[in-house]
């Protein structure tokens, strides 16, 4: 089970994350309306953090996505906006980075909306549907995922907390395409500042 810690921003917190928690991925948010927005001025030190970095974008133009991917040394692009299949295909070809396509989950899931993206994404990510595009701290009904029809793997997000570890492991048994988890607001001391002790415990629980 892979672990992505998203919404990282504070220098000391990022450095400690890389040496104590050592997640598989570190998420950097480039959405201007997010309280966890990462500024370009941070690139000079973030690029040296020895973790694979995922850039989180919401409705961003492709030229800016490509600029940020180089500036921050991104390994993957997480797309939260209304990107078309053609736009996703173009990004995949232009950057050769991993592409993660996010779908917000409300009361239901329409698998047909995802079908055409399957050839061009490396994984899907399911988050709780909110106007703020993530970071809500709210959990959605995971039972909706039990009809997941694709071989393509996915990440689970949306208000995950320490107490959810056992339930996540059970879900991964039912749905083997569940590759990992996206952790954010449920492990924060403040927006952009993570509780590293809680993350360490969660990782231990998830890898038992």
Image (cartoon, helix red, strand yellow):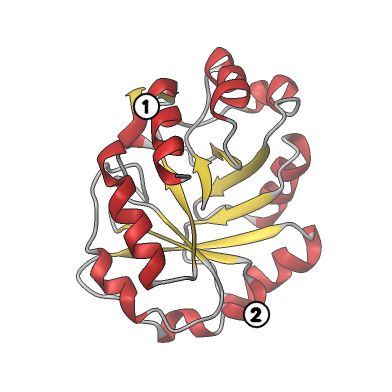
Q: Nearer the viewer, residue 128 or 145?
A: 145
Number of the front mark, 1 or 2: 1
Question: Is 57 positioned to the left or the right of 148 in the image?
Answer: right
Relative image position of residue 123 (x, y in whole percent): 57, 65
Gap between marks 1 and 2, in whole Å? 36 Å
Secondary structure of residue under mark 1: helix
Q: Is residue 31 above or below residue 175?
A: above
Question: Is 179 positioned to the left or the right of 146 in the image?
Answer: right
**Can you identify the residue that label 2 sits on?**
119
Q: Which residue lies at the image location 76% right of the left edge and 35% below the top edge?
A: 71
Which part of the image, by quadrant, shows the C terminus?
top left
Q: Which residue lies at the image location 60% right of the left edge and 42% below the top edge?
A: 25
**Can you identify the residue that label 1 sits on?**
198
Q: Which residue lies at the image location 58% right of the left edge and 16% below the top edge?
A: 11
Q: Is residue 27 above or below residue 14?
A: below
Can residue 131 be seen from the camera position used here? Answer: no
Q: Nearer the viewer, residue 38 or 51?
A: 51
Rendered image quadrant of residue 97: bottom right
Relative image position of residue 34 (x, y in whole percent): 41, 36
Relative image position of residue 193 (x, y in whole percent): 42, 21
Q: Which residue lies at the image location 45% right of the left edge and 36% below the top edge?
A: 204
Of the image marks 1 and 2, the number of the one nearer the N terminus: 2
Can residue 172 be seen from the camera position used here? Answer: yes
Q: Is residue 167 above or below residue 92?
A: above
Residue sticking out furthest to the front: 208
Residue sticking out furthest to the top: 12
């Amino acid at each position: 089970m892979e672990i992505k810690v998203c919404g990282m921003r504070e220098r000391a917190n990022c450095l400690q994350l890389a040496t104590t928690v050592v997640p598989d991925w570190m998420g950097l948010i480039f959405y201007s309306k997010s309280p966890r927005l990462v500024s370009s001025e941070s690139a000079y030190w973030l690029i040296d953090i020895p973790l694979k970095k995922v850039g989180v974008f919401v409705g961003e133009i492709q030229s800016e996505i490509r600029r940020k991917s180089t500036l921050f040394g991104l390994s993957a692009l997480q797309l939260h906006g209304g990107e078309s299949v053609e736009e996703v295909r173009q990004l995949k070809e232009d950057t050769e980075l991993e592409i993660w396509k996010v779908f917000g989950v409300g009361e239901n899931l329409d698998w047909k909306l995802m079908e055409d993206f399957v050839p061009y994404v490396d994984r899907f990510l399911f988050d709780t549907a909110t106007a703020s595009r993530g970071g809500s701290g709210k959990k959605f009904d995971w039972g909706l995922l039990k009809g997941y029809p694709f071989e393509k793997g996915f990440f689970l997000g949306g208000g995950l907390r320490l107490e959810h570890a056992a339930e996540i492991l059970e879900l991964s048994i039912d749905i083997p395409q569940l590759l990992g988890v996206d952790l954010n607001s449920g492990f924060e001391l403040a927006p952009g500042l993570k509780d590293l002790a809680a993350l360490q415990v969660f990782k231990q629980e998830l890898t038992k």
